[in-house]
Image: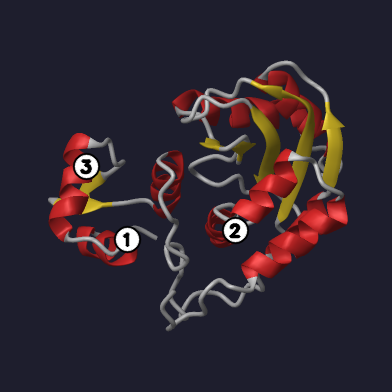
Amino acid sequence: MRLGVRDVASQFGVSDKVVLRWVEEDDLPVSKLDGHYRFSPAALFEWAAARGMKIPPALFRESENGDREVLPNLVEALRAGGVVEKIPGTDKRAVLAAMIGHLKLPGGVDREALLQIVLAREQLGSTGIGEGIAIPHVRNPIVMRVPRPMILLGLLEQPVDYAAVDRKPVHSVFLVITPTTRSHLHILSRLGYVLQDRGLRKLLATHAPTERILQAIGEVETSIPSPGKSG
């Protein structure tokens, strides 16, 4: 799914001229197709999150004509992936390697290769979105033979330098693994929305009990506007 200038302007509640200014002056990722600007929703998410902007809940919404894949809510995806406390590591690579070691992946999956894919994405720009939180993923979704989308939340043993936009060390990492592009965008959009909540960020920063974190995520997620509604 690619968006045009007018689509992006509508989602962010700005004019077309503002979007074009973002492209020219603020490094908004864009490509050209038949002379028209086209924007990747995942790249838009990264760009907006890195600037502390509100993520439009409809940014990743796809046509009802798409497939009938059942998409999980965040709590379901987190229960599938797990929440792990005291993830060891003194740098980004060590933390991600430890987290990938905890992933519930099918037998035969090359975890070292997966680590290299995630690190390659980090070289394009940190997935640290600020306030001590990172969401490692790849711009082109990892498509793996996993039965369902999963998020592994790692609460780090010690904060690490993640080259985040606000330069604050990261203490909480949401590693996203999905079986389809559609589920990848679905998970990113919902994470982008709920992680703007100050109360949830405080729980993550203080490494609150797992069930309290999941409860808070579920509560914030229920406030995401439904299709056709503003919010």
Quickly name the residue at label 2.
194
Q: Secondary structure at mark 2?
A: helix
The amino acid type, in three-letter code, at marker 2 is Val
Q: Secondary structure at mark 1?
A: helix
Q: What percent of the width, then of the height, locates residue 175?
A: 68, 42
Find residue 108 and report its image quarter: top right
Please state, as top left, top right, bottom left or bottom right, where the N terminus lies in the image. Answer: bottom left
Residue at 40% in and 49% down: 53
Q: Secondary structure at mark 3?
A: helix
Find residue 2 and report its image quarter: bottom left
Q: What percent of the width, then of the height, locates residue 74?
A: 69, 61
Q: Residues within 10 Å of mark 1 (few under 14, many from 20)?
A: some
Q: Are marks 3 and 1 in contact (CB under 8 Å)?
A: no
Residue at 66% in and 54% down: 199
Nearer to me, 53 or 58? 53
Cα distance between the residues tagged 1 and 2: 17 Å
Work out whether 103 lies above or below 17: above
Cα distance between the residues tagged 2 and 3: 26 Å
Please state, as top left, top right, bottom left or bottom right, where the C terminus lies in the image. Answer: bottom left
Work out whether 142 lies above or below 192: above
Nearer to me, 183 or 113? 183
Quickly name the residue at label 3.
23
Which numbered dot is residue 21?
Answer: none
Which callout, 2 or 3, points at the residue further toward the start of the chain?
3
Quickly name the residue at label 1.
12
Q: What percent of the width, then of the height, locates residue 98?
A: 80, 27
The amino acid type, in three-letter code, at marker 3 is Val
Q: Residues within 10 Å of mark 3 (few under 14, many from 20)?
A: some
Q: Are marks 2 and 3 in contact (CB under 8 Å)?
A: no
Between circles 3 and 1, the one closer to the viewer is 1
